[in-house]
Amino acid sequence: MAEELTFPTGIGTSDPTTISLLGEDLAGDLMGTVGFGELAYWLVAGRRPTRGEVRVFETVLVALADHGFTPTAIAARLTYLSAPEALQGALAAGLLGGGSRFLGVTEDCGRFLADTLAQAGEVTDYDALALDAVTRARRERRLVPGLGHPVHKEQDPRTPALIRIADEEGLRGPHLRLFEAIGRVHPQVLGRTLPLNGAGVCGAALADLGLPVDLLRGFALLARAAGLLGHLAEERRRPLGMRIYQTVDRNAVYEP
């Protein structure tokens, strides 16, 4: 007799009459009682978040949902212009642009902070640790993720707002504190003052929530999916894709 195949999962299963998600009845226990942000956290962390964790987590999602005509938004709009019958393609095009310069900073910063804290062990002086980390990065000619922003040259308005909310919920942990310290000490090393950007502070906040550092970019993409859908909805109401395309095309210059 052949061995019965099993594929264990702690996410969800279904049968002809019920859908189970995270061990709960989807229709009877979750729908109408659990918000999407809470569910997203629960799915990844494997535990139901506290009210404070939900507030900080959803603040991050709001902070990362949109930032105007970024390359991700333009890519989505132009793909929709080219293939309006494939909304999923336009969304995917925008999400594929989430990398080290846009959106990916969330994960890069979280990883930088987590690695620095892991190497330090018990931390008693965040400023000293930050100074050492920035000095080492400068010596190795590496950028410090989360420092600087192409638009917000003095302060990213998302940064103090998220830190305040995390503090109000008792979730201003070591990653956020180290990130704040980097903001204080980096001018000593770099010779100039750069703002702590919103994507970076989101990575610090997510790391303080105990979420896997390797998945932090996924949360940025989850948030930006909502923003991209908004851009595509606006593209249907008030099209800009053709103007963007024609502006670039008509100003293209051949240079061998």
Image (cartoon, rainbow, N blue to C red):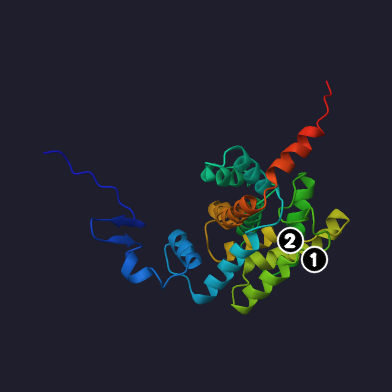
Residue at mark 2 = 130
Q: Is residue 256 above or below residue 50?
A: above
In the displayed orientation, state which residue is furthest to the right: 191
Q: Which mark is residue 153?
A: none
Contact between labelled residues 1 and 2, with CB atoms less than 8 Å apart: yes
SS for callout 2 = helix
Of labels 2 and 1, the one closer to you:
1
Which residue is at the front of the view, 201 or 25? 25
Residue 228, how many percent across, how many down?
61, 52
Examine the rendering and report whether any part of residue 250 can be seen.
yes
- Which mark is first along the chain, 1 or 2? 2
- Which quadrant is home to the N terminus? top left
In the displayed orientation, state which residue is furthest to the bottom: 168
Residue at 43 percent across and 70 percent down: it is 34
Residue 242, how many percent across, how many down?
70, 41
In the displayed orientation, state which residue is furthest to the left: 1
Examine the rendering and report whether any part of residue 126 can be seen.
no
Q: Disc 1 marks which amino acid? A: Arg
Residue at 77 percent across and 60 percent down: it is 131
Residue at mark 1 = 184
Judged left or right of residue 195, residue 10 is: left
